Image: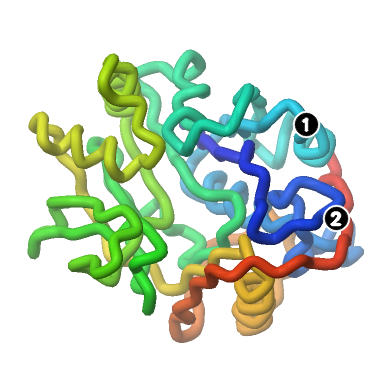
Amino acid sequence: MWGIIPAAGAGSRIQPLAFSKELLPVGSRLENEVERPRAVSEYLVERMIAGGATKICFVISSHKSDILGYYGGQVGPAEIAYVVQPQPAGLCDALFRAVPFIHPDESVLIGLPDTIWYPENGFVLLPDDVLSFLLFPVARPQFFDAVVTDRTGQVIEIQVKQPEPRSSWIWGAIKMPGHVLHALHALWSEADRRDEYFGTLVNAYLARGGTARAVRAGEAYVDVGTLNGYREAIRLLNEQVPSTRSSWEIAPRPVPRARLVESVEATPLAAVEAQPLAQ
């Protein structure tokens, strides 16, 4: 099973930083009984491994070699690969950079590296045989991709940053069979498409007879891409039960009442630096 992590963005909402935003220290981890800062993207890597990923592909820009230096070639049981997105061209372009490596029979997990969400075993809750979305309730869905479903969880539409969305549930993680990823890539590659947003591409996929499911199992979701989100992430993590394990060994556990957080204002953050993972 593959995990795809789009990490080529500039992170303009939280600049200036002296490093890639995916390495922003948020919380900590224990390494050989020593507490060390933890990069925000580690939370997604942990959740992908908990969901069954044995291979993870970071899609990075050419100037983000610090991500390669931080993660190296392996994290716990998962091998790490890297693909370069030559220039910023949207989420779809980033995700499909990994298509040549993924067999149609393999499963694929997708998440955003500057978010922290619960439950930790969220990927496990998604079905294996169909395009599926893990949904989270938020107070301001207009700043995200709101997912409209019927009563059975069938996805009807994804409303991308619409002023008055019909749903307060947004997607925070995705799972799909590899053949669906290839089908989405083929659709995106048509001459009149090249969608920037994944939601608009999914809408076209549904219009052509595709199927997608949504699971409303999200409990807490924080976008750490702004200073306000960074503060909320620290508060959320402080509510969790401390662990003495390495980040990729943490077992899923229940969390307190969901905190609904989403921030849109960008504020500079003082430069801090996380330490690379031990290989």
Q: Kindly indicate the quadrant of the structure image that contains residue 257.
A: bottom left
Task: Name the residue at 28% across, 46% down.
Answer: 132
Q: Is residue 49 above or below residue 78?
A: below
Q: Is residue 81 visible?
A: yes
Residue 77 vs residue 63, the one in the foreground: 63
Residue 152 vs residue 78, the one in the foreground: 152
The Cα–Cα distance between marks 2 and 1, rounded to whole angstroms, is 18 Å
Q: Earlier in the sequence, mark 2 or mark 1?
A: 1
Q: Quadrant of the C terminus?
A: top right
- Tag 1 secondary structure: loop
Q: Is residue 108 above or below residue 148?
A: above
Task: Name the residue at 47% across, 38% down.
Answer: 91
The reply, left or right, for residue 70 in relation to residue 172 is right
Q: Is residue 83 visible?
A: no
Numbered label attached to residue 274: 2
- The image shows residue 9 at horizontal and vertical percentages of 62, 42
- Tag 2 secondary structure: loop
State yes or no: discs 2 and 1 in contact (Cβ < 8 Å). Answer: no
- The image shows residue 248 at horizontal and vertical percentages of 66, 51
Numbered label attached to residue 6: none
Q: Nearer the viewer, mark 2 or mark 1?
A: 1
Residue 60 vs residue 127, the one in the foreground: 60
Report the amino acid beneath label 2: Ala
Q: How is the image coloured?
A: rainbow
- The image shows residue 223 at horizontal and vertical percentages of 55, 64
Residue 58 vs residue 199, the one in the foreground: 199
Numbered label attached to residue 63: 1
- The image shows residue 172 at horizontal and vertical percentages of 42, 56
Task: Name the residue at 68% across, 71% down.
Answer: 227
Report the amino acid beneath label 1: His
Q: Kindly indicate the quadrant of the structure image that contains residue 141.
A: bottom left
